[in-house]
Structures are given as C-alpha cells and as structure tokens.
Image (spheres, grey):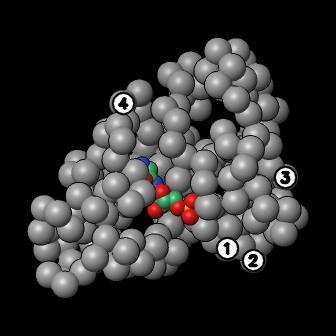
Amino acid sequence: MKRIVIFASGSGSNAENLIKFFHNSDNASVIQVLTNNPHAKVLERCRRLKTSALSFNRIAFSKSNDVLNILKIAQPDLIVLAGFLWKFPEFILREFENKVINIHPALLPKYGGKGMYGMHVHKAVVTNKETETGITIHYVNENYDEGAIIFQAKCEVETSDTAEDVAAKIHKLEMEHFPKVVDKLLYN
Ligand code: GAR
C-alpha cells in the first residue's frame, strides 16, 4: 500500500477529494494530513473522513526537526501540497527528493511566486484579460512554484468571467485531475 501525506492550509477541498479517491483504492491511502493553521476547515473535513490530522507551528516546521520526524515515521511515498501556503524548508525537501508535489491554480510559469495563491491568482488572470488559464501540478523545489512541471490542464476565460467564475472552473479541473495524477505518480 502506497502512503500519501497531505499538507493543506485552508478549506481542504482538494485534500478531501484525494482522501475520498484513495478510500476507494486498494493501492494507496492518505495516511496523514498536516496543517499550519489550527483553524483550517481541512481539520473538520479530516474528522468527518476519519483521517488523522495534525497542526503545527513555524518552530515545529522550519526551526526544528519536529515535522521532519513526523514525516520520517510516516514514510510517505508521496507528499502532496494541496493549498499549502508556507514555503517548504529545504532540509525537509532534501530528505524526500522528488517526492513532494504541489498544485497551483494557474498555468505556471504564469501567475506563480510569493503571494500568488487562491483568489489572488484568479483576480490577476481576469485583470490581465487572459483568454485561458488552468492548473499546474509540479515538483516542489526551494523556490515558490518553480519545480519541474508534471501536468497541466487548461480552461477558457470568457470576457464576462469574474474571478469567482474562474475559481469555479479551476476547482472543477482540480477535482477531476489531481487524484488521477497523484495515483499515476505513485507508480512511476
Ligand atoms: C487550490 O485552488 C490550490 O490550487 C490553491 O489553493 C486552493 C486550495 O483550495 N493553491 C495555491 O494557490 C498555491 N499557491 P482547497 O483548500 O479547497 O483545496
């Protein structure tokens, strides 16, 4: 059984989708969710889905080995960042080379980097009158949104679309593709 650990900071709709997808799998399972936000809705979702979840602070994450040790014990085959907003420390990345991936709600390298997350991305896409946008699933390296791209999917942006309309289209793409890409990666 392959083991997946998810990091999330907010609502956790992607985390829930992944947990449910792998509930129906004989090959892999989400064994742990970790969050930097003790008030994140993802914790509520994990309670409902009977999935182990923990929250941590900056000291545990990047100023000590606490989160690293949790990961070492969990022995994940893949670490999935699903709406996780903190920069991933290099010393953890080094221990899990090519095993940490992220989903970004735009077609990287466009609309990436610090501060580009969630609705900020969709607002920028609409302001710049883009005709298309999409999702990017990529490996995580020491720079925000710059690791090698694994998968992208596109959608059209209509001139009448608001940032909320774009968010809904992106959400649909994420729900459809993310679990399948994660599943495929586990068997590479
Ligand atoms: C998702 O759209 C994800 O792509 C985005 O945050 C949202 C999290 O939603 N990630 C980023 O913007 C990372 N830079 P969720 O908490 O409902 O899964």
* Residue at horizontal 36 percent and vertical 30 percent from the top: 143
Q: CA distance from mark 1 to mark 2?
A: 6 Å
In the picture provided, is 185 more to the left or to the right than 148?
right
Judging by the rendered image, the residue that carries numbered circle 1 is 21
* Res 21 → quadrant: bottom right
| Residue 63 appears anywhere in the view | yes
Q: Residue 143 shows which numbered tag?
A: 4
The first of marks 1 and 3 along the sequence is 1
* Res 152 → quadrant: bottom left
Q: Nearer the viewer, residue 141 or 57?
A: 57
Mark 3 surroundings within 10 Å by alpha-carbon count, few (fewer than 14), some (14 through 19), many (20 or more): few
The first of marks 4 and 3 along the sequence is 3
Q: Residue 24 shows which numbered tag?
A: 2
Q: Position of residue 137 (x, y in %)?
A: 41, 56
Q: Nearer the viewer, residue 26 or 48?
A: 48
Q: Position of residue 48 (x, y in %)?
A: 84, 69
Q: Amino acid at mark 1?
A: Phe
Q: Are marks 1 and 2 in contact (CB under 8 Å)?
A: yes
Question: Of all residues shown, which one is farthest toward the top?
Answer: 63
Q: Amino acid at mark 4?
A: Asn
Whether the residue carrying mark 1 lies under 8 Å from ligand 1 is answered with no
Q: CA distance from mark 4 to mark 1?
A: 29 Å
For label 3, the SS is loop
Q: Are marks 2 and 4 in contact (CB under 8 Å)?
A: no
